[in-house]
Image (spheres, coloured by chain):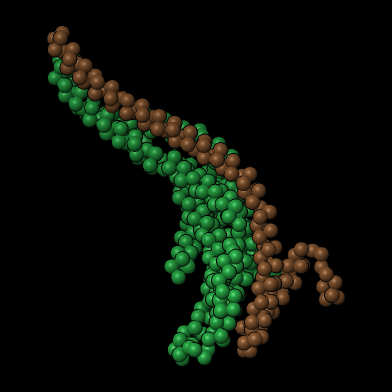
Amino acid sequence: MNDGAIPVDPQAVKDRYQQLHDAIAHARETCTELGERQRLRKSAEEVRTLITAMDQEDMASRTGAFEALGTQVQSANSSLEKLKQDIAGIVQDAAIAAKVVGAIDSAITTSAKLFL
Amino acid sequence: MILVWSGCGLSPLAKRSAAFGNAATIVVRDSSNAYETVERATYDAAVGALVLDFESTGFDRTKIKPFLSAYDLDVRQQILRGLQSYADGLAEVAGDRALAPVDEQGKVLSEALVKLSANGDLKSVLPGVTEAEAKGLATAVDTLAKVLIERKRRKQLPTIIARMQPVLERICDLLDKDLGMKPLNGHAGHGLRNELWNQYDNLIGNETDYIFANKSRFTPSEKAAEIARLPQMVAKQQSADSALASTQEAVRQLVSTHRVLLAPQSEGTFRSRLHELIEDGERIAAFYSSLKAQ
């Protein structure tokens, strides 16, 4: 790493950029000369842009995998929805029972008028 | 049978699933906040640079860029919304709420049966039907409905949960990688934590530049206030990273807690994991809220 050769491992490249970024960030904190500060800020911006681009690429590499999992999450949610509907169906049956009893009540009253 | 059911309407699996659903909601919200926190730091750093450059370059709108593209962010938010629906669905289907309409219908049925038992004409056809018997019948129907619901849940919930386990593992693994690692001892980090850390370095650098560029214009108290912001920003960098690291831990815990949902023998493990998940999740959520308020 110290022989000046360019590392080919992406993590090693990123490590070098990060070391440079940290050194510039430290220099920015302690530098008191305005012109030098401006120069350091531009250098920091350039290095950070490269690190950010690598991070963005890393994040983007997972987007497809996230997207593919969406269908499976949707499938689990559909199964939960189906279960919810089944439960609603049972509740509905109880509601029908209440309605039937109400109907029996009025049917008995009506038939009593006719036959009793 | 009736007494048993009225005493414990929810089975252990239903109780666990409902509790997990509620805890997962917090973790999903924290994960969403993690992306938002990094985007806000990126935006704040860009605005800081704009303030410093304004007199020399004016306003260049292309310099205000998000960290993640709208597409990358949208795909992640969609997955988190899907997980949110799963958590909500579990809590709703497995929790007390699923039984509430049954109780309501049971009450309506009971009232209808009591009315029927009091029907004078019925008494002449079928003498001896009492109000207590009518209420008993209503309770029986109510109980039967609850038994049927529980049977549905017992049959379907384990399949849904087991099918979701590998999906959740994969999603949480991707979220874990997205959250990444901060730079440490000259080694570059990656993901959201790396970006957040570097953006805070940038914010601190911009604030220092701002102080130097304006030092002759500040009153002593203004200058002191600006300088005092620097250590505060360093502390905020640490705590913002801690929030992301804790979110990462909560995401990992979510997977292991979901895994023990179907293991009745590990009730103690489930409870302690759930407890940690909720406690950590709420603490992280409070931190993200404090960041938004600043």
In-image side of B158 versus A59 (left or right): left
Quadrant housing the C terminus of chain A? top left
Q: Residue B220 at x, y = what percent? A: 46, 91
Looking at the image, can residue B201 be seen? yes
Residue at x-position 56% and y-position 42%: A73
Name, please, the residue furthest toward the top.
A115
Q: Which chain is green?
A: B
Q: Residue A2 at x, y = what percent? A: 83, 76
Residue at x-position 25% and y-position 30%: B110
In-image side of A98 versus B58 (left or right): left
Q: Which chain is brown?
A: A
Q: In the picture shown, does residue B89 fall above or below A97?
A: below
Q: In the picture shown, does residue A55 fall above or below B269?
A: below
In-image side of B194 versus A90 (left or right): right
Looking at the image, can residue B247 be seen? no
Of residues B96 and B268, the one nearer the viewer is: B96
Disc count in the image? 0
Q: In the picture shown, does residue B150 fall above or below B208?
A: above
Residue at x-position 17% and y-position 17%: A109
Q: Residue B199 at x, y = what percent? A: 60, 70
Q: Residue B135 at x, y = what percent? A: 24, 29
- Residue B9: quarter of image: top left
Quadrant housing the N terminus of chain A? bottom right
Residue at x-position 66% and y-position 52%: A62
